[in-house]
Amino acid sequence: MDETIFNVFFREKPAHMMIHLKNSATEMYASSLAKKVDCTYSHVVKILQEMEKSGLVNFEKTGRLKLLSLTKKGEQIAEKIEAIKNLL
């Protein structure tokens, strides 16, 4: 798969964040997601807040941490992004 052409169609970090959230076998937090997509924590949180406003992700507070999950709409979009990534 050619990452360059994928990045022409999608902003790299948000697209990879969606795919990682979709495919995560463990609980995902903003800090762990930042490490997975090689991005700063503050940038990830900023993107996640926009995704939350659009109804794509949920934050569930567990103690001091906020657990991330995709909404039904977020799951559908992540599946489409991943399918396009695999086609490229």
Image (spheres, rainbow, N blue to C red):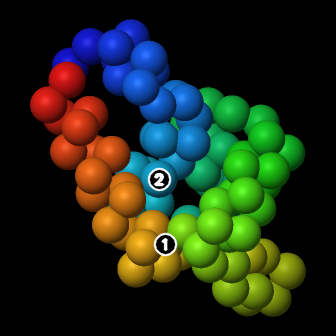
Q: Nearer the viewer, residue 35 or 43?
A: 43
The secondary structure type at the circle numbered 2 is helix
Q: Does label 2 or label 1 sit earlier along the sequence?
A: 2
Q: Position of residue 63 (x, y in %)?
A: 81, 88
Which numbered disc covers residue 70? Answer: 1
Relative placement, left or right, of 83 versus 6 is: left
Q: Quadrant of residue 39?
A: top right
Query: Residue tagged by mark 2?
Result: 18
- What kind of residue is marked 1? Leu
Name the quadrant of the C terminus.
top left
**Separation of disc 2 and disc 1 at Cα?**
8 Å
Identify the residue shown where x is 60% and y is 51%.
33
Name the quadrant of the N terminus.
top left
Q: Are marks 2 and 1 in contact (CB under 8 Å)?
A: yes
Q: Is residue 39 above or below residue 54?
A: above
Q: Is residue 45 above or below residue 56?
A: above
Q: Residue furthest left?
A: 87
Identify the residue shown where x is 23% and y is 37%.
84
